[in-house]
């Protein structure tokens, strides 16, 4: 199968259970964090669990990618090197990395994938990463279709696959270019400890100090949803479709993976020149509905160009879908006009008069009368009611909600003392089993043939499926065979095929860097280059970089710097962009938030500077936090 025609659905795995669920619900690959050095510090896993996940995935020719995508201190490099070897021995297929220092270490022959933290926005950066040995690179979420096509034109799909996030949370900053969490709390996003400062409420003021917006989540984006753009992304050159969510729950992984599996399968049905990258077909006991599990509203971001409705300014939480209007409310009881029936256990949400999100669980429903499990805080007549937990839908996902099977063909033939069963699956892997058994002439040959077909197709809880018309009886006649012996032959054949599938899996090879070493697109790297160790410095020097500054996490920057660089622009969101209003000047604005430090209320404004030529916004501030200070929860 050509890499250029291969499509991969890449799903998140918080842990072993989540990873297995993602595979069962149709993922072609999963990405998971190891015991350390992952960009989601709260989503670590043991090597034993990763090995179990790899064994399960490889049965379906699916891949397991290890996220080792933090920047590393010099004293962490040896531990990271050992972890890579352990992961390799556990069966991991590729590493997702940000720190180029890893490429200077003694690593096993394992594929390298460039993390979103590598901030890949240009054809030059993409080509460089391909040429230094990366086999897959994830492009910046902010790119549009034309920019993606330009990257595809500059790279070789047979050498380097292009990956793109199609669903889940959106970081407002270009990935890898956000230092605001470290600046305020000492917790670095590049070290897997993002405090999500972007999800907090801020007050926006114009250059004259006038308040334009108060206590709104102006840096909080809606969630990514590229469902409508999948085919356009394929045509632009994307081969791997990534779902965000290594911190999301099991219901989210099942629901969203199943949704994109169905969407991609529909494309594959009408595009025979394309093929999925793994084997087996998933069937579901529920109808996937991404809006039913965690999301902040949906946007396709900049894929089809800039548009205004990308922010989740009212709340960074899961508000849910609007379902009705409150008529009356008192204590725990409310009367509502709803478009969809509510059920016991549903979660409801509403905004109070101050604009804060409130919520409660449904205890009982009697017509339009709804009793909550607790006092309905801030709920008034006329308020819009949202449902952010559909108990009936969650119940469908709670148990086994999918099964994934490979189609088989079988051939039953005779041996001197019994029968032989040959099996081959949809991937071309084959195996056989023999059994010495009694054969007797059947009194009803037609019925005996049907029995043989049906018995061989009873594959139960295995990962295989076979239809009677895919069973060939290459015997002298349709013998009567004791059912116990026929079942034993089928089980032996399936076991042999499982062994053969695992043996047939080949880890994808590590790409060979070009010689002489490719030149990095720039000769200088500032603090946003995220160089945090001597090995990374050696890498960049070897590739032509002459001036290399330390990463922000080294705490060398004491003055005002860009803590975020975003394609999101509050001027555009408030219709104050020079491209929207003639004659307006893109003067700086400020973001304010009251923060408590040692019992004192402190105002620490952030300056918003607008680079209209690049159509970017810089969030400018200085490092004020220290290690251990926690940001308030969004």
Image (cartoon, helix red, strand yellow):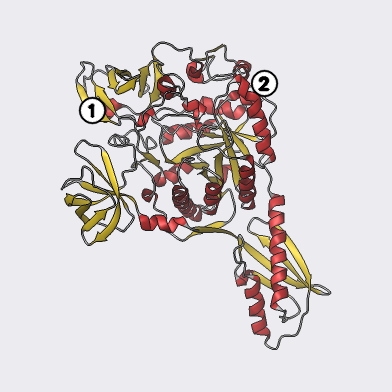
Q: Residues within 10 Å of mark 1 (few under 14, many from 20)?
A: some
Quarter of image, res 108:
top right
Task: Write the residue at 31% across / 47% down.
Answer: 320
Task: Write the residue at 57% across / 40% down.
Answer: 45
The residue positioned farthest toward the right in the image shown:
416
- Image coords of residue 21 (percent x, y): 53, 51
Is residue 411 placed above or below 400 in the rendered structure? Answer: below
- Image coords of residue 530 (percent x, y): 52, 21
Quadrant (top left, top right, bottom left, bottom right) of the C terminus:
top left
Instruction: Answer whether labels 2 and 1 touch (C-beta < 8 Å).
Output: no
Q: Secondary structure at mark 2?
A: loop
Q: Secondary structure at mark 1?
A: strand
Q: Residues within 10 Å of mark 2 (few under 14, many from 20)?
A: few
Where is mark 1, residue-wise? 214
Where is mark 2, residue-wise? 516
Task: Write the residue at 65% across / 37% down.
Answer: 87
> Residue 463, labelled with which disc?
none
Q: Is residue 232 left or right of residue 467?
A: left
Q: Is residue 478 left or right of residue 125?
A: right
Q: Is residue 435 left or right of residue 191?
A: right
Between label 2 and label 1, give the one nearer the viewer: 1
- Image coords of residue 187 (percent x, y): 46, 25
Q: Nearer the viewer, residue 275 or 468?
A: 468
Mark 2 and mark 1: span between their CA atoms?
55 Å
Q: Nearer the viewer, residue 504 or 6?
A: 504
Residue 512 visible in image: no
Q: Nearer the viewer, residue 601 or 153?
A: 601
Is residue 282 placed above or below 306 in the rendered structure? Answer: below
Is residue 139 placed above or below 446 in the rendered structure? Answer: above
Residue 388 visible in image: yes
Is residue 132 placed above or below 296 in the rendered structure? Answer: above
The residue positioned farthest toward the bottom in the image shown:
443
């Amino acid at each position: 199968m050509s890499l250029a025609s291969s499509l991969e659905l890449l799903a998140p795995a918080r842990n072993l259970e989540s990873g297995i669920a993602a595979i069962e619900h149709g993922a072609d690959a999963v990405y998971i964090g190891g015991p350390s050095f992952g960009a989601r510090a709260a989503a670590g896993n043991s090597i034993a669990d990763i090995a179990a996940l790899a064994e399960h995935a490889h049965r379906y020719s699916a891949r397991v990618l290890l996220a080792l995508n933090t920047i590393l201190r010099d004293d962490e490099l040896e531990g990271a090197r050992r972890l890579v070897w352990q992961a390799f021995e556990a069966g991991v297929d590729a590493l997702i990395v940000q720190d180029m220092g890893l490429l200077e270490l003694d690593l096993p022959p394992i594929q390298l994938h460039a993390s979103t933290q590598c901030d890949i926005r240009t054809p030059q950066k993409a080509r460089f990463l391909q040429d230094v040995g990366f086999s897959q690179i994830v492009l910046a979420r902010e790119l549009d279709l034309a920019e993606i096509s330009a990257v595809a034109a500059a790279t070789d799909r047979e050498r380097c696959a292009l990956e793109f996030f199609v669903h889940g949370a959106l970081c407002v900053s270009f990935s890898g270019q956000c230092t605001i969490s470290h600046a305020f709390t000492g917790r670095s996003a590049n070290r897997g400890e993002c405090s999500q400062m972007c999800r907090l409420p801020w007050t926006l003021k114009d250059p004259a100090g006038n308040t334009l917006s108060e206590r709104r989540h102006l840096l909080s984006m809606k969630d990514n949803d590229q469902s409508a753009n999948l085919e356009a992304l394929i045509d632009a050159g994307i081969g791997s479709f990534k779902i965000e969510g290594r911190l999301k729950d099991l219901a989210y992984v099942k629901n969203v993976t199943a949704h994109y599996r169905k969407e991609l399968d529909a494309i594959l049905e009408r595009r025979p020149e394309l093929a999925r990258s793994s084997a087996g077909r998933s069937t579901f006991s529920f109808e996937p509905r991404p809006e039913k599990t965690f999301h902040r509203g949906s946007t396709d971001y900049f894929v089809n160009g800039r548009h205004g409705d990308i922010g989740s300014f009212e709340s960074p939480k899961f508000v849910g879908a609007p379902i009705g209007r409150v008529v009356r409310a008192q204590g725990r009881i409310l009367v509502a006009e709803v478009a969809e029936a509510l059920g016991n256990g549903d979660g409801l949400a509403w905004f109070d008069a101050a604009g804060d999100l409130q919520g409660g669980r449904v205890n009982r429903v009697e017509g339009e009368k709804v009793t909550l499990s607790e006092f309905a805080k801030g709920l008034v007549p006329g308020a819009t009611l949202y449902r952010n937990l559909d108990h009936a839908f969650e119940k469908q996902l709670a148990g086994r909600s999918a099964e994934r099977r490979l189609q088989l063909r079988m051939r039953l033939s005779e041996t001197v003392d019994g029968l032989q069963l040959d099996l081959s699956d949809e991937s071309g892997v084959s195996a056989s089993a023999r059994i010495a058994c009694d054969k007797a002439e059947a009194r009803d040959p037609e019925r005996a043939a049907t029995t043989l077909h049906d018995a061989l197709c009873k594959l139960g809880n295995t990962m295989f499926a076979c239809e009677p018309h895919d069973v060939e009886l290459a015997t002298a006649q349709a013998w009567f065979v004791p059912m116990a012996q026929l079942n034993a032959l089928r089980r032996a054949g399936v076991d042999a095929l499982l062994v053969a599938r695992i043996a047939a899996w080949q880890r994808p090879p590590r790409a060979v860097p070009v010689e002489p070493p490719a030149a990095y697109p720039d000769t200088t790297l500032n603090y946003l280059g995220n160089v945090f160790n001597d090995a990374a410095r050696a890498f960049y020097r070897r590739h032509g970089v002459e001036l290399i500054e330390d990463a922000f996490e080294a705490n060398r920057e004491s003055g005002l710097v860009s803590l975020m660089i975003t394609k999101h622009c509050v001027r555009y969101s408030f219709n104050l962009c020079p491209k929207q209003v003639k004659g307006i000047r893109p003067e700086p604005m400020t973001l304010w938030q009251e923060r408590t430090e040692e019992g004192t209320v402190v105002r620490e404004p952030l300056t918003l500077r607008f680079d209209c030529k690049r159509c970017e916004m810089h969030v400018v501030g200085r490092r004020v936090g220290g290690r251990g200070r926690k940001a308030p929860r969004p």
